[in-house]
Image (cartoon, rainbow, N blue to C red):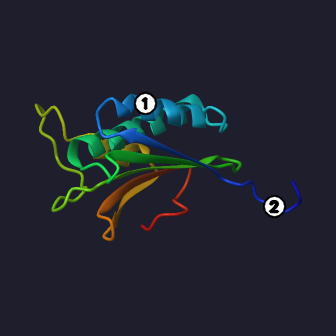
Amino acid sequence: MPTGARPVPATHWATFAHDAASVPRARHVVRSVLDGAGLDEMATAEIEIVLSEIVGNAVRHARPLGDGEIHVQCEVIPTAQPHVEISVTDGGSPGRSVARRTAGESDTGGRGLFIVDGLADEWGVVENLDDLSRTVWASFGGPTRHHPH
């Protein structure tokens, strides 16, 4: 590589059905992308956990995209400390925002975005008003490079 040149990010896209079976499928695809990225096992596991939460929320709380599916993206920016960004795009859920909520001790749900917040360096939501889609993204290995704060 020429002096001063930067490694090219590797971006991987996958499309999944809008159903719960897509959670482990998405994890498997992202795991295969991350296996060659130079991350330690703990970092890879944390990214998988966050991805599971975001895909699970898309299936439980949002509509599918117009094609009946959800889209998952994983981008690996190869630097001294690899930087990874994942995102999940769904059909949104009009009138409902993506926000952490407080779960009671006996609640069986409501902790997912606290997990995302605790494991990701940054995360956020991008609403696309043109097609009513919503993208939830998370960044690992440093601040985001592509998403608004």
Residue 19 is situated, as x and y percent measured from the top left of the image, at 29, 35
Q: Is residue 50 visible?
A: no
Q: Is residue 148 left or right of residue 96?
A: right
In contact (CB < 8 Å): disc 1 and disc 2: no
Instruction: Determine the residue positioned at 18% across, 36% down.
Output: 109
22 and 147: which one is in front? 22
Q: Which mark is residue 25?
A: 1
Q: Is residue 100 left or right of residue 87?
A: left
Q: Is residue 48 visible?
A: yes
Residue 110 is situated, as x and y percent measured from the top left of the image, at 19, 41
Secondary structure of the residue carrying numbered label 2: loop
Residue 24 is situated, as x and y percent measured from the top left of the image, at 40, 28
Q: Is residue 27 left or right of residue 115?
A: right
Mark positioned earlier in the residue sequence (1 or 2)? 2
Secondary structure of the residue carrying numbered label 1: helix
Amino acid type of the residue tagged 2 in the rendering: Ala
- Quadrant where the C terminus lies? bottom left
Q: Which mark is residue 73?
A: none
Give the alpha-carbon distance from disc 1 to disc 2, as whole Å. 35 Å
Instruction: Determine the residue positioned at 29% across, 32% down.
Output: 20
The residue at which mark 2 appears reads as 5
51 and 89: which one is in front? 89
Q: Crowdedness of circle 2 by 10 Å Cα count: few (<14), some, many (20+)?
A: few
Q: Which residue is the extreme one toward the bottom?
A: 130
Q: Quadrant location of residue 37?
A: top right
